[in-house]
Amino acid sequence: MYMSSNYICVCSFKRKLLSTYWDPKVPIYPYVYGMSEHHRIAVPLKPNSYDLIPQPRSVFYEFIEVEDDDEKDEDDEQTLESFELHQVEEGKRYEVVFTTYDGLYRYRTQDIIKIVGRYYSLPTWHLIGRRGQYLSVSNEHVTELELREIINSILREYEKEFTSVSPQYSVFIDKSSYVLSIEVDDEKQDNKDQLKQIGKELSTKLDEKLKESNEDYKTCREKKKISSPTILWLKYNTLTTGIRDFRLDPNKSGSINSKAQKDNQLKSQMILKRKKDNDTIKFVKENIVLQVN
């Protein structure tokens, strides 16, 4: 059946992974940027492209500009200036806000886009991540999507050494270092020498890939504003059911009773932010099997 396909459409960022399994003659491309609140917010400008173009008759768009340090923008009670389609500027990043014709009013998606060009009078953009889902030690800006692609590529070589399932990991900042925390299976936790060796190799490769991918990170490393990455090996299930149970426990300071945790009470997070996820980071550190600097 697949050999006779003219094309394959996906609604996911797994396009690059899928392309390794199918005949390269069969194009695979995302056909829409949408969500449960509205299924057709933007479409690719052309096949096999991540350049997205809005659909002005689909929803009413607004855009909130995202600064390099947008933690002050994460308070939903603030009234933030918004821009319409014709007002956004190339090169800047915005959160997408929309109002549907069915009555959903000014829905803040938390999706962050970067304006990359124009198609006649309409802006074109790339979807680059979620609001607050990036790391920054010294004015560099490493996004969730950038991190995910790098980490997945370097873990692929080692994952069978520490897990029998898909690797579970998260990233956060500790002092001046990026910290990659990874779950390790129970039966593999005792082999500390092997975990230490793998951890050192992962730290080196993560550092090299980040330098290649992000010029600002490279500059900060050269000026010694950022230390080399730290690897934390964690007890099995720390990042999945462990964090979920921690957040649902009403006796914990980082539970969903606190405003900072409500948005993500049952969702796994790849990036943990020092300000709003401080208690969760403390919980992660309480479940360390081995730390590799």
Image (spheres, rainbow, N blue to C red):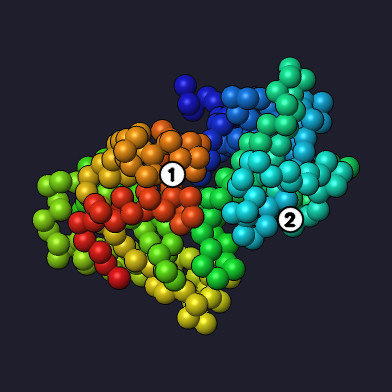
Q: Look at the image and tell me in which quarter the C terminus lies.
A: bottom left
Residue 150 percent location from the top left of the image: 45, 57
Local crowd at mark 1 within 10 Å, few (<14), some, or many (≥20)? some
Residue 166 percent location from the top left of the image: 31, 42
Q: Which mark is residue 269?
A: 1
**Viewed as shown, does residue 86 lie left or right of 177?**
right
Q: Which residue is mark 2?
A: 92
Amino acid at the residue labelled 2 = Lys
Residue 265 percent location from the top left of the image: 43, 35
Residue 151 visible, this angle? no
Question: Is 63 placed above or below 170 here?
Answer: above
Q: Identify which residue is drawn at 44% across, 71% down.
A: 176
Q: Identify which residue is drawn at 60% across, 35% down.
A: 30
Amino acid at the residue labelled 1 = Gln
Give me the C-alpha separation between circle 2 and circle 1: 25 Å
Residue closer to the observer: 13 or 137: 137
Q: Given contact means CB atoms under 8 Å apart, are the residues at marks 2 and 1 in contact?
A: no
Q: Earlier in the sequence, mark 2 or mark 1?
A: 2
Q: Identify which residue is drawn at 53% across, 55% down.
A: 134
Local crowd at mark 2 within 10 Å, few (<14), some, or many (≥20)? some
**Viewed as shown, does residue 211 lie left or right of 45?**
left
* Residue 269 found in image quarter: top left
